[in-house]
Amino acid sequence: MARKPQQRRSRETVRAIVEAGFISLARHGMEGTTTRHIAEIAGIGVGSLYEYFTNKEAVFDAIYQYAVKDIVEVIRPLTPQLVTMEIREAVITLLRAFRGWLLRDDSRYLSYVSYTVHMAHRDNLEPINKMLMELVVQYVMHHPRLLQLPDLPTKSYIIINGGIFTIIRHLGEANPIITFDQLVDGLGDMVAYMVEGALRDLERAEQR
């Protein structure tokens, strides 16, 4: 950012530029977006944009910061509730919350995340992955039996990333072959089946 906004008017201008960045991203994609596109949508001159952002990549960095902040604000308050749920219910509740975030404000985050996934910007999802891994840790602490599952970090990584990318792909399809409810129910069933099956195997092994 060229200079940090101090006054309220400056902060509002920055916010307008970021909002315009979301809109331009949805219209033109990351490669097609230009600072002129963003400035025109924001209703300001390109020179005014450059007072706060050195280039379009700096605007995308600000979009990233807004995205991370917003998803944290969505998931963190749910954590105390999620960790007390059965695994299937927790997965479904979390995925519904993730969907709500992606579709907020004319699907702005779905557009952003879709481009970051398909254009080698997967590291931008790392804060989301990290937050969800922290949620897994808290969930396991409330359900200590899960600590006995073999290779729990690997399973958690697969479930989290698989769930994220499956939701993004489904929401991005014009005519998905299944409904969103069918998708989240299926993912919830799959995770519950895997976890409960592994726990049953452990119980059988202990009884031998």
Image (cartoon, grey):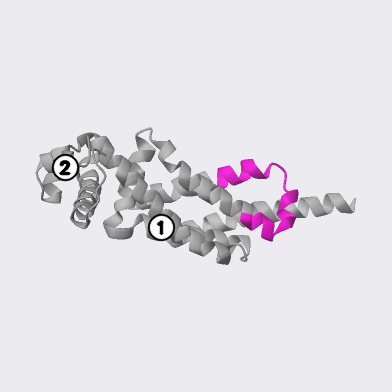
Q: Residues within 10 Å of mark 2 (few under 14, many from 20)?
A: many
In front of the other: 97 or 15: 15
**What's the amino acid at mark 1?**
Arg
Q: Which residue was labeled with disc 2?
A: 49
In the displayed structure image, the side of residue 3 where residue 187 appears, left or right: right
In the image, 126 versus 116, the foreground residue is 126
Is residue 173 shown to the viewer in this render?
Answer: no
Part of the protein shown in magenta: 138-159
Q: Is residue 3 above or below residue 185?
A: above
115 vs 2, nearest the viewer: 2
Residue 21 in the image: x percent, y percent? 23, 46
Q: Residue furthest right?
A: 208
Percent across and percent down for residue 50 are 17, 38
Residue that carries the numbered disc 1 in the rendered image: 99
Label located before the other in sequence (2 or 1): 2
- For the N terminus, the quadrant is top left
Q: Is residue 26 left or right of residue 40?
A: right
